[in-house]
């Protein structure tokens, strides 16, 4: 009788679970529970450190998790005998494998819950064509590679081996691709949607082929048994669709709207995941197949969100890294020996990478997509991860893959996934996606053209004031208003960010969760506004994204829809006692980021109750008193341009106060303080534009009794503040510019005391809690990209606060002047001089 000396037999006492303690003379690492805790802690800490190191290189987390296992495994630290026998002894592998597979089971369940098969239906044949084209060539290459590797593998069914390698090389990891697309901000592009749809199709195809491969691996000689496995798996799928899914819908219907799902149902569903895994494992398919199918039949809505919220952090943060690390622990790079083997490895990586790119590029050319988009799509299809690692692990467990083949394929997965983001970032530049369009500001828009507005909403509380503002914006047949309403929702418990267009949901259909209930409330309010207002069209959207990147989604929507004006709510809201409380600090960061990268004009709305309570008796129209504080510069011109449009509304009374310098000496000092001739010429041009614009406004509104123009002469910032504080509380809305443009000593130094610099000096003063008048304020920043005041203004994203922008340079000079002139403010306190033109004006002398 021959003995196979390569096999190892490990014996240990099953009762050694917990230790009696060091003081009793026990070594904790001889017991399974303390050893498992140490192993899990080391794996999580190692993978997190690697993820932190690789984050600047924009690597997916799966790369760090597999590399962590490789470092702890026989390829690196496992080479140290003491470490290998003490920390990761063979007797502990069973416990690690069991817990890792439980984590995998629930992660695949979550993937099924998050996966939207309707995406495939929307893209149709196009996504199917890309899925097939990106799989065929790598699959053929995998077959060729399998013939090379199979020579060194013994007791392996070559047909099964070909299937396993073909799947591992041709599949695209849907969860990894979703995170890569979200990080590259490509998820909501046409290319991102095609990539996601193709990945879903490939995932489904991979599961089908994997089920066949497992059946063939376990039943090498019994064709009838393989057929039984496939029929049983099909029966399980139909059982989930026609029995389990209706039961889940019944649970949702029994849950009152607004209440959470009962814990008993959640417990039963989580148990159902285990039962599904047991059933599919018992019939001959891998247990993760059952969990994945069970997740697919979970209806979208509160049930799915509740399950994700309860499981996401624990499974993805703790248990799933254990599975990937186990793959790394099984990988012994030292098995890849010989120069020829490494050449084979490099050849496989290059050929599979090129194979997917070429296959995808052919289909892209057929659909007349740009060349670089086809290449980018092909590179994205090379995202490896979960499915491939599962395939490789199953292949190793079924003895289809030996140690050498397994190490080769894990290395291929790591290298291909790690190369996706750097290569896509190098080829697919975001600037190529920028849309060039005219009328990025209200000042440059024609008065007889459509005004496109993007209204951003955090909560339904923002809705009434924004609707009142839009209603007062004078939509007419000559100049209609197209409103894109964007409900901003923080990304929680989803794999990736997304933008939802609300154009197919049936009216009156019950909301599935609190977020959708808020969206429905917002949409309903704007639809009512659309029905009762003339020349207004409303297009509701929802952006689900992390607050850290929400501004990018907002600006992408604005650019895609060719919007001229973005309205965003202030990050504070009014309290009962008239104060201002911060709603969420993240809202302020969003506003600041939008101001920096916006492709058009931006207005920050400080809501203090611009309601529609005041109505005219005729036609039920809104009546508002609006005040514009004008100092000059592009932002103030934009504020006046918007107010000018509003003045056409029959219920609007508009007052404009232009602040004029009454100190010629200070003005002269300011002019001569410019450190370059070109800057002085720019300032002169801005002043001339201000003069021409104001003259044009006054000329065209001279006979309009609802418009009052006031010239207010002041000498310094103190007088400016004194005049503003003397304004009577008769107005409903202040409109001011943020403060870009020619320097003025009339506001110099005020920014040093600003609580919210993003509002500008005057906007911050009006929005402060100690301002005596509680009036809504709209702070306007004009788009200042190339060609700001040209009709065909530039195509790129302008950055008003960029380091080289004229505005930033002017502000630097502005602060220097303020510092030098500060002492003069304390000495000069003349009474404000008031020169009033027109009727009234609502300010006290």
Image (tube, grey):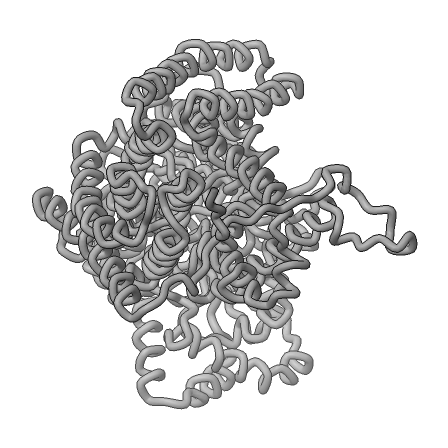
Q: Residue 668 falls in which quadrant of the image?
A: bottom left
Compared to 83, does 174 lie above or below?
above
Q: Where is residue 353 in the image (x, y as percent from the top left)?
A: 24, 56
For the residue pair 165 and 82, the one nearer the viewer reads as 82
Q: Position of residue 783 (x, y in %)?
A: 34, 60
- Residue plotted at (28% across, 22% down): 223
Q: Position of residue 779 (x, y in %)?
A: 48, 54
**Image-based side of 391 in relation to 517, left or right:** left
Compared to 486, does 358 lie above or below?
below
Q: Where is residue 107 in the image (x, y as percent from the top left)?
A: 50, 37
- Residue plotted at (32% across, 69% down): 338
For the residue pair 810 and 194, the one nearer the viewer reads as 194
Whether residue 779 is visible, yes or no, is: no
For the residue pair 650 and 408, the one nearer the viewer reads as 408
- Please state, as top left, top right, bottom left or bottom right, where the C terminus lies in the image: bottom right
- Residue plotted at (39% across, 25% down): 527
- Residue plotted at (59% across, 62% down): 723
């Amino acid at each position: 009788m021959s003995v196979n000396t390569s096999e190892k037999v490990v014996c240990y006492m099953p009762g050694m679970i917990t230790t009696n303690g060091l003081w009793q003379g026990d070594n904790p690492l001889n017991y399974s529970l303390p050893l498992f805790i140490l192993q899990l802690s080391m794996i999580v800490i190692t993978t997190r450190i690697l993820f932190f190191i690789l984050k600047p290189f924009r690597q997916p987390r799966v790369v760090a998790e597999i590399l962590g296992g490789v470092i702890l495994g026989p390829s690196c630290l496992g080479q140290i005998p003491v470490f290998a026998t003490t920390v990761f002894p063979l007797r502990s592998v069973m416990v690690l494998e069991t817990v890792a597979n439980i984590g995998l089971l629930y992660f695949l369940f979550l993937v099924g819950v998050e996966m939207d098969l309707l995406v495939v239906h929307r893209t149709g044949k196009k996504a199917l064509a890309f899925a097939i084209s990106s799989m065929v060539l790598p699959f053929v290459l995998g077959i060729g590679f399998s013939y090379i590797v199979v020579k060194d593998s013994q007791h392996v069914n070559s047909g099964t081996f070909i299937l396993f390698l073909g799947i591992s090389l041709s599949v695209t990891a849907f969860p990894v691709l979703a995170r890569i697309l979200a990080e590259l901000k490509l998820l909501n592009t046409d290319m991102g949607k095609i990539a996601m749809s193709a990945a879903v199709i490939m995932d489904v195809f991979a599961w089908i082929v994997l089920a066949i491969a497992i059946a063939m691996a376990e039943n090498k000689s019994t064709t009838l048994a393989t057929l039984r496995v496939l029929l049983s798996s099909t029966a399980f799928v139909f059982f989930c669709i026609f029995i389990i899914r209706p039961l889940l819908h019944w649970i949702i219907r029994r849950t009152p709207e607004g209440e959470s799902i009962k814990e008993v149902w959640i417990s039963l569903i989580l148990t159902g995941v285990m039962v599904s895994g047991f059933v599919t494992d018992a019939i001959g398919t891998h247990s993760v197949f059952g969990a994945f199918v069970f997740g697919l039949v979970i209806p979208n809505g509160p049930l799915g969100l509740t399950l994700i919220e309860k499981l996401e952090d624990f499974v993805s943060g703790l248990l799933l890294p254990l599975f990937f690390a186990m793959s790394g622990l099984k990988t012994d790079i030292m098995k890849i020996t010989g120069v020829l083997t490494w050449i084979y490895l490099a050849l496989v990586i290059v050929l599979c990478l090129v194979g997917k790119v070429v296959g995808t590029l052919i289909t892209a050319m057929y659909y007349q997509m740009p060349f670089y988009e086809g290449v980018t799509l092909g590179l994205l299809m090379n995202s490896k991860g979960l499915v491939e690692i599962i395939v490789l692990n199953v292949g190793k467990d079924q003895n289809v893959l030996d140690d050498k083949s397994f190490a080769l394929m894990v290395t291929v997965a790591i290298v291909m996934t790690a190369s996706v983001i750097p290569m896509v970032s190098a080829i697919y530049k975001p600037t190529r996606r920028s849309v060039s369009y005219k009328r990025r500001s209200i000042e440059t828009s024609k008065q007889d053209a459509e005004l496109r507005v993007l209204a951003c909403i955090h909560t339904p509380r923002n809705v009434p004031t924004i609707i009142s503002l839009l209603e007062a914006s004078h939509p007419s047949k000559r100049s209609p208003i197209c409103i894109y309403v964007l409900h901003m929702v923080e990304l929680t418990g989803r794999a990736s960010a997304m933008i939802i267009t609300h154009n197919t949901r049936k009216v009156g259909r019950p909301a599935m969760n609190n977020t959708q209930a808020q969206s429905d409330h917002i949409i309903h309010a704007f639809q009512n506004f659309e029905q009762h207002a003339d020349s207004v069209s409303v297009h509701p959207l929802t952006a689900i994204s992390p607050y850290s990147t929400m501004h990018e989604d907002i600006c992408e929507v604005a650019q895609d829809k060719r919007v001229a004006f973005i309205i965003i709510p202030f990050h504070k809201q009014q309290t009962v006692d008239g104060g201002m409380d911060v709603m969420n600090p993240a809202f302020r960061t969003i506003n600041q980021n939008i101001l920096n990268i916006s492709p058009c004009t931006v207005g920050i709305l400080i809501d203090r109750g611009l309601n529609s309570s005041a109505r005219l008796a005729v036609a039920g129209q809104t009546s508002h008193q609006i005040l514009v504080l004008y100092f000059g510069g592009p932002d103030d011109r934009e504020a006046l341009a918007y107010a000018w449009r509003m003045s056409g509304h029959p219920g609007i009374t508009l007052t404009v106060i232009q602040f004029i310098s009454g100190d010629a000496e200070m003005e002269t000092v300011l002019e001569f303080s410019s450190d370059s001739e070109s800057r002085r010429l720019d300032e002169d041009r801005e002043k001339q534009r201000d003069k021409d614009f104001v003259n044009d406004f006054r000329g065209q509104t001279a006979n309009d009794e609802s418009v009052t123009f006031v010239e207010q002469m002041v000498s310094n910032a103190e007088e400016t503040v004194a005049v503003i504080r003397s304004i009577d509380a008769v107005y409903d809305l202040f409109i001011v510019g943020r403060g870009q443009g020619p320097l003025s000593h009339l506001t110099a130094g005020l920014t040093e005391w600003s609580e919210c610099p993003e509002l500008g000096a005057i906007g911050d003063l009006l929005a402060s809690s100690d301002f005596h008048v509680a009036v809504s304020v709209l702070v306007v920043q004009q788009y200042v990209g190339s060609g700001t005041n040209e009709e065909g203004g530039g195509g790129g994203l302008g950055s008003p606060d960029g380091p080289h922008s004229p505005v930033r340079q002017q502000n630097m000079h502005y602060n220097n002047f303020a510092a030098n002139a500060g002492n003069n403010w304390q000495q000069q306190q003349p009474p404000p001089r008031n020169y009033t033109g027109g009727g009234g004006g609502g300010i006290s002398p």
